């Protein structure tokens, strides 16, 4: 492998170490490690993602004279992630850069890191294999941690090292990448049994988190898997089985039963209010989310292009509370609990378009290619679908560092894997 000449001793030593270790092996190791302790070790994701970003930037520099052949769709996606970060900078400057924007820039710049990450991973053939292997260990370690908390420590809700709203969705993402692999194992019955066991362990952890967006994602992804693998009568029967599984979980798993009953009651209570803005009591969790959805078009009307800037939601919503347009409870949160509302409020139509660019665009490409490249496209379809569903009730999916790092790395690996497989078949 050719490395361009460098002048400093530091760079010579760094290149020497990369040659000894092998850049491919280093990247594979980090991709493998990231999912393993995502839920159980604090700052694990940020540290591993940071190392991957540094390594990818170094590789991008060292290979700057090597042309990477990318498809047009890949280039458009890279520009999309660059634009997503650019929109953050633009909307922050237009609205007045402050301490909030400085604080959030550490998360937002990760979207720009998609570019060097993708360029590095695109040249490596086995990143997807190592990511999926890492997810296997991630499910095992998280299930062990969850079982210990529930059965040994008698903790009612499994939170992981952060929050149940992070742990539940993340374990859904991990297992969703393993289930497609179930159909690629051929006649290896022991592997099928192993993956089914992992799925049961994962569903147990998800149930104990009480994360309702994770529950919804399980049902949606279950339907996707069935549509992917089965046809005719089998498909109809298995779709019925998914709903039976969901209903049985509601009946026999106390945590699921309580969380769904609460969601139903809170929804009916909210719609029973004549005017939620003038309601004198405190809004429920669901009621607060719905009120945040209701304030979104008001923000859009007043700040259509650039929004109010990332981190300015709490300040911006005060005038609508004072005017009696929305309930005061939604001003007690730092951001709306919906990634689509967050994009519109913080970054206006520019932000919403950028969001669609990094989520809907790759999904459209993968769905388009699905018939001819079924196996490689399906992994990415599952990942993006899971994020889009879970983002309906939580903005953390793309505004928190750990959450966004998972999406960025997983998409880089799975989208590049799809185009590697397309290139091999053409």
Image (cartoon, rainbow, N blue to C red):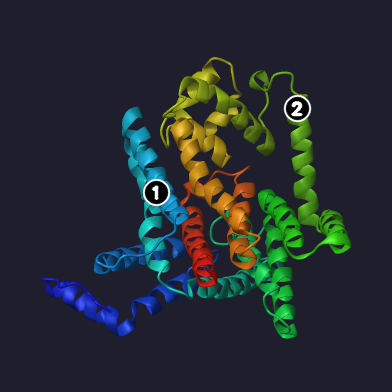
The answer to whether residue 318 is above or below residue 250 is: above
**Residue 141 versus residue 191: which sits nearer the camera?**
191
One can see residue 103 in this view: yes
Discs 2, 1 touching: Cβ within 8 Å: no
Q: Name the residue located 42 percent from the left edge and 49 percent from the top edge.
A: 81
**Residue 419 versus residue 90: which sits nearer the camera?**
419
Q: Quadrant of the N terminus?
A: bottom left
Q: Nearer the viewer, mark 2 or mark 1?
A: 1
The answer to whether residue 224 is above or below residue 11 is: above
Q: Name the residue located 23 percent from the left edge and 81 percent from the top edge.
A: 16
Spatial CA distance of label 2 from label 1 is 42 Å
Which image quadrant is residue 244 in? bottom right
Q: Secondary structure at mark 1?
A: helix
Look at mark 1 in the image and give the residue it sits on: 79
Look at mark 2 in the image and give the residue it sits on: 271
Q: Position of residue 424 (x, y in %)?
A: 51, 72
Q: Position of residue 269 (x, y in %)?
A: 77, 30
Q: Which mark is residue 280?
A: none
Which image quadrant is residue 123 in? bottom left
Q: Residues within 10 Å of mark 2 (few under 14, many from 20)?
A: few
Q: Name the residue located 51 percent from the left edge and 75 percent from the top edge.
A: 130
Q: Position of residue 186 (x, y in %)?
A: 71, 81
For residue 149, side relative to residue 14 (left or right): right
Q: Secondary structure at mark 2?
A: helix
């Amino acid at each position: 492998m050719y490395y361009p000449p460098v002048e400093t001793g530091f760079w010579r030593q760094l290149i020497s170490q990369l040659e000894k270790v092998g850049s491919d092996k280093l990247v594979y190791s980090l991709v493998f490690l990231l999912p393993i302790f995502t839920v159980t070790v604090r700052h694990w994701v940020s540290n591993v993602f940071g190392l991957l970003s540094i390594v990818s930037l170094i590789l991008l520099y060292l290979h700057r004279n090597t042309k990477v052949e990318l498809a047009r769709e890949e280039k458009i996606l890279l520009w999309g992630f660059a634009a997503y970060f650019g929109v953050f900078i633009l909307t922050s400057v237009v609205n007045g850069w402050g301490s909030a924007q400085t604080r959030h820039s550490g998360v937002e710049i990760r979207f720009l890191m998609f570019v060097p990450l993708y360029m590095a991973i695109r040249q490596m053939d086995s990143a997807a294999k190592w990511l999926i292997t890492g997810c296997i260990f991630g499910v095992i370690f998280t299930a062990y941690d969850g079982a210990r908390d529930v059965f040994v420590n008698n903790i009612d809700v499994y939170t992981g090292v952060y929050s149940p709203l992070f742990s539940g969705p993340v374990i859904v993402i991990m297992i969703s990448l393993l289930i497609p692999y179930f159909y690629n194992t051929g006649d290896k019955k022991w592997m099928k049994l192993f993956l089914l066991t992992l799925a049961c362990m994962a569903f147990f952890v998800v149930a104990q988190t009480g994360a309702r967006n994770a529950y919804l994602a399980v049902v949606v992804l279950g339907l996707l898997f069935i549509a992917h693998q089965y046809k005719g009568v089998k498909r109809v029967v298995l779709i019925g089985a998914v709903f039976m599984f969901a209903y049985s979980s509601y009946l026999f798993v106390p945590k699921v039963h309580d969380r769904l009953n609460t969601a139903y009651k809170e929804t009916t209570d909210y719609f029973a209010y004549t005017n939620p803005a003038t309601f004198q009591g405190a809004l429920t969790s669901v009621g607060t989310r719905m009120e945040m959805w209701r304030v979104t078009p008001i923000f859009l009307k007043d700040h259509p292009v650039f929004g109010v800037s990332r981190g300015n939601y709490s300040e911006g919503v005060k005038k609508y509370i004072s005017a009696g347009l929305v309930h005061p409870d939604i001003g007690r949160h730092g951001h709306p609990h919906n990634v689509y509302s967050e994009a519109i409020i913080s970054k206006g139509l520019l932000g919403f378009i950028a969001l669609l660019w990094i989520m809907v665009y790759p999904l459209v490409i993968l769905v388009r290619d699905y018939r001819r490249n079924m196996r490689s496209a399906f992994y990415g379809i599952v990942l993006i679908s899971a994020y889009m569903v879970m983002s309906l009730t939580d903005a953390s999916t793309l505004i928190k560092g750990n959450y966004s790092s998972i999406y960025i790395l997983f998409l880089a690996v799975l989208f590049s894997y799809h185009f590697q497989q397309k290139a091999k078949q053409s």
